[in-house]
Image (tube, rainbow, N blue to C red):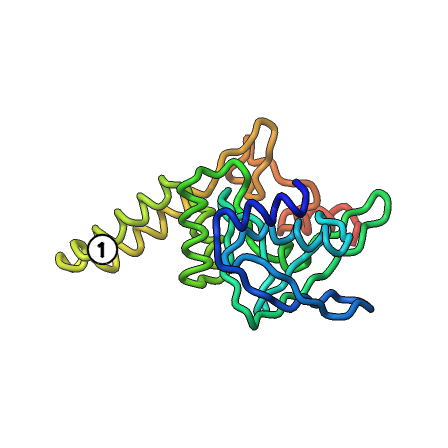
Amino acid sequence: MRMEEIVEETNGKHEKMVEITLKTIGPARPSRLHVASSIRVLDLRKLIAGKNHLPVENLKLILRGKVLHDREDEDDIYIQLNGDDSLIAAVKPKAPVGLSIDDDDEDLKFQLPQSTSQWKKKLFSFLRNRLKLPDVLLMAIFSLSLKAWALIILWFILAPVAHKWDLGPLYILGTGFCIIFLNLGRRQPGDVSAYSIFNEDFKELPGTLNADAIDRDIRTGRF
């Protein structure tokens, strides 16, 4: 889509136009730009890239101290511009051949997999953007399965019942033992436990140091 087409399409949808200041990082001087007061970020990037002959795929826009993104949860993002706004345009340098340069801030943020369902993406966006939950908490929330959350909710429902019957300590101890046993896992064929009592014929791991090994070394003159 050409720059003229973007302007015509934008003018067809929004009648109010504003004049903002565009500052490009580099030797270029600030310029004035006439755009619609409400515009898609993607259209704004294409408009600025076409006017200043910049690569649209590497162009980053910063408004009021925040980096503008084209889409969020598969939906286009619209921004509201005012006449006194200043927009900063920065071109991300191209990566050397065979390497890729990613945004450091994006790398440090917790991201949902692409295969995540739409309702989870909506919930993730609400918790991060509206409630401002930290990434550590978001990671803990979305790393658990629905079955795990059902067990957690069931635990909190049964906790008052256990407290009413004076079984609080036993309830907590039982929970701890359940967590331990549920996370023990299963040994694959051929695996040997670190505790010889669990192995066939009480077989020990190579290099195990115990009283029998020390006594055997003394009797054979190794010490």
Instruction: Say which quarter of the image contains residue 103.
Output: bottom right
User: Residue at horizontal 26%, vertical 47%?
Assistant: 154
Q: Could you tell me which quadrant the N terminus lies in? A: top right
Question: Which secondary structure lies at badge 1?
Answer: helix
From the viewer's perspective, tell me whether residue 9 is left or right of residue 179: right
From the viewer's perspective, tell me whether residue 130 is left or right of residue 205: left
Identity of the residue furthest to the left in this view: 165
User: Residue at horizontal 58%, vertical 58%?
Assistant: 35
Residue 49 spot, x, y in % from top left: 71, 52
Residue 113 spot, x, y in % from top left: 54, 41
Mark 1, Cα crowd under 10 Å, few <14 / some 14-19 / many 20+, is: some
Q: In front here: 153 or 70?
A: 70
Residue 7 spot, x, y in % from top left: 60, 49
Answer above or below: position of 39 versus 114: below
Q: Could you tell me which quadrant the C terminus lies in? A: bottom right
User: Number of numbered discs present?
Assistant: 1
From the viewer's perspective, tell me whether residue 96 is left or right of residue 159: right
Answer above or below: position of 119 versus 187: below
Q: In front here: 44 or 142?
A: 44
Residue 120 spot, x, y in % from top left: 42, 44
User: Residue at horizontal 32%, vertical 51%?
Assistant: 175
Identity of the residue furthest to the right in this view: 97
User: Residue at horizontal 47%, vertical 41%?
Assistant: 184
Residue type at tag 1:
Ala
Taking the image as drawn, is residue 125 in sight?
yes
Answer above or below: position of 114 versus 57: above
Identity of the residue furthest to the top in this view: 189
State the residue position of label 1: 159
Q: In front here: 204 or 143?
A: 143
Taking the image as drawn, is residue 135 in sight?
no
